[in-house]
Amino acid sequence: MKTYLNYILFFLLLGTLTVKSQSQNDALKFNLKGRVEVRNSGRPISGVSISNDMGNFVITNGLGEFEIKTRIGDQLIIEHDDIETLRYDVEKNDDVLILVEDFESSAISSRSKSLPDISIKHQQLLDSAEEYKADDIERSIDLVAQSISILGKRGRKKELARSLSKLGEIYQYHKQLDLAIDNYEDALENNKTIATSLLLARAYNLTSRYSETIYLLNPLLEIKSMPPYQSALLYELLGDANKGEGKDLVAIELYNRGLLIADKNQLTPKMIDLNSKIADTYSLGNQPMEAEAYYDNSLDLATQSAPKRALQEKEKVADFYNTKSRFNEEITMRKSSLEELKKLKSPNTGVKKLELGDTITSQRINYKIANAYISQDKYNEAIPFLEKSIVEAGSDDDLVVQKDATRKLSEVYKVKGDFTKALDTYQNYVALVDSLYVRKEQEISRATRFNREIANAQNRLTGLEKERELSQSKYDLALTEQELVQESNKRQQLVIYSLIFGLLLTLLAAFFFYRSNQQQKLANNLLALKSLRSQMNPHFIFNALNSVNNFISKSDERSANRYLSDFSTLMRSVLENSEEDFIPLEKELQQLELYIKLEHSRFEDKFDYRIDVDENVQVSKFQIPPMLLQPYIENAIWHGLRYRDEKGELLVTVKENSVDSIIISITDNGIGRKKSAEIKTQNQRKQKSKGMGIIKKRVAILNDMYTDKVDIKISDLQADGIGTKVLFILKREK
């Protein structure tokens, strides 16, 4: 124990010294102005890239001038297509003049005088695209397209790579990660740079393609002259990838190597990020003492750095306290976050909600504080925070938090025995669920339209790039034919090679067209599933609420409250699983048993029920679409057993079918499908079971996506048409 205490004190002391060192170093930052020109003629050189150890990057303008934020001791890296890479050590805060030898002889004589102007225009277009990135994606993409079109027919692969990389950043900002990855990869094909490699690695990590990140970044570890900021980011991304693959010890080692570089060069943002990620990894590995030491470091650094970053880190530490059941410390931390959030929301700060993230809002923090109180059974303390969360979420149009807080408040009232308020609050919750359903439909519609616009923009860019490639091919072909006019044999070979190239280009285009169609089909299936799930929940809620209403109207208050309590438990389970394609079979059976129990309490004189699960069936290894079995149970009770003169029986069995599949059987000895159809009213005959229709569509889509995972067969139980038997054959994922 004493060793652990010494270990924590060491990290706290290290964090304090680091924070002091950082605050002193921040004061040394300044804006350095400079100019790049040719030594002999004094001619300014535009389009020169200037970067430094902090990761800052600028381009010289038409007068060869630049301005970059730096520090004493940093090294400037000066790069251009037509000069050798230069390095300049910053020794004082004075204007800098960088002289280049023999630029005119190597550049002006071999290139058109208009090319530097193209570089300037190209960079201006990319800067404009960055400005419109957040608010007008179509305008931003159009500006990137213009930056590609001005490059002309010849060369300039570095500029083309910058355009493609910027396009990837735009797509990544709007969470179109597949398109972002495609453009990053195209950019690397045209010009391999560290910056683009790091952007691509981050996109790989966001899509859980960790092995590709490691394969991409491992060679960069051999580069000795990498700027410190990029080097720290390199180790951070490699750490993320190894953590994603479950290699926590390797991840911590990589994070620490990045932290050493960031600490040495006083890169505060990276120091915060890496301390926080080391803490996350220790926390996942159930090493709370080590995790807390690093969280303390990241929080101290963030507090010294920027208020919004400190707020983000406070919430992260509060979540850590929550996972360790240290609720008092969590509540104290979150209340402090609320005070900081009030200051940040003042008009003088200019901090936007988007910069803080969707999770850092006052309504969410109040909701989390309430949950911490509830975890300690302090319901009276929790109620004001829940009420405040509901009001703030309503004013901020945050239906998700408003729904969750309203449901939680209803549960608190129920635990306290105030069933009137619990029922009123629950009715508000149901209304919010309906509103959220409408909102989700609108979001699906907007997402479809947005994806269509993105696809159109990408098609325009693809067409532009193909046209540029074709123009360059024609230019090169004409030049080659002119040079080889007397060499007929070589000309014939060139024609053959050109035809082969055209064929390969056609095959490549066909491949990309096929891949695009497959991706679109998958996206359409996912949207259809989400829509069908959204339809299934309101249908189930409507039928279940009818049952609740009927029961309440016929029973005493105590029975009604007990029925409503079971119904709320069922509804919570249904809503929690509503966004999943598949859930564990064990959870579906529990949910199903609760539903049958509710219906049995209403039709107790009509049927008995039994759920049998074969002991040989490993239920935990099977997944099933949520709400798949319930509509068939509902049909068995409402259209079969309910009309029997004598008491019937409902039997649900789960048996092994083969090594990789099971059979779920639902049988009832009700009046049967034929007789049920005969006694339906004329109006009922015109209507089809909405639940059955949705189930069929869901199963069809899921079987298409997961290769015949579910099979359903319906038949009469007896030869005379009495009773119904439904068989589900469920396959296990291999």
Image: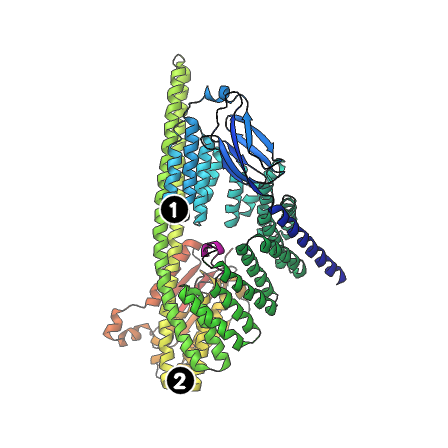
Q: Would you say residue 514 sits in the magenta stretch?
A: no
Q: Quadrant of residue 538?
A: bottom left
- Disc 2 marks which residue? 605
Highlighted magenta segment, given as a residue range: 349-360
Answer yes or no: is residue 63 visible.
yes
Q: Position of residue 498 (x, y in %)?
A: 39, 25
- Disc 1 marks which residue? 137
Answer yes or no: is residue 653 visible.
no
Q: Residues within 10 Å of mark 2 (few under 14, many from 20)?
A: few
Observer-nearest of 602 and 151: 151
Q: Residue at x 70, y 58 (%)?
A: 8
Q: Quadrant of the N terminus?
A: bottom right
- What is the spatial separation of the Cα atoms under label 2 and label 1, in whole angstroms? 63 Å
Q: What is the tally of numbered marks visible in this picture? A: 2
| Element type where label 1 sits in the image | helix
Q: Residue at x 35, y 60 (%)?
A: 441
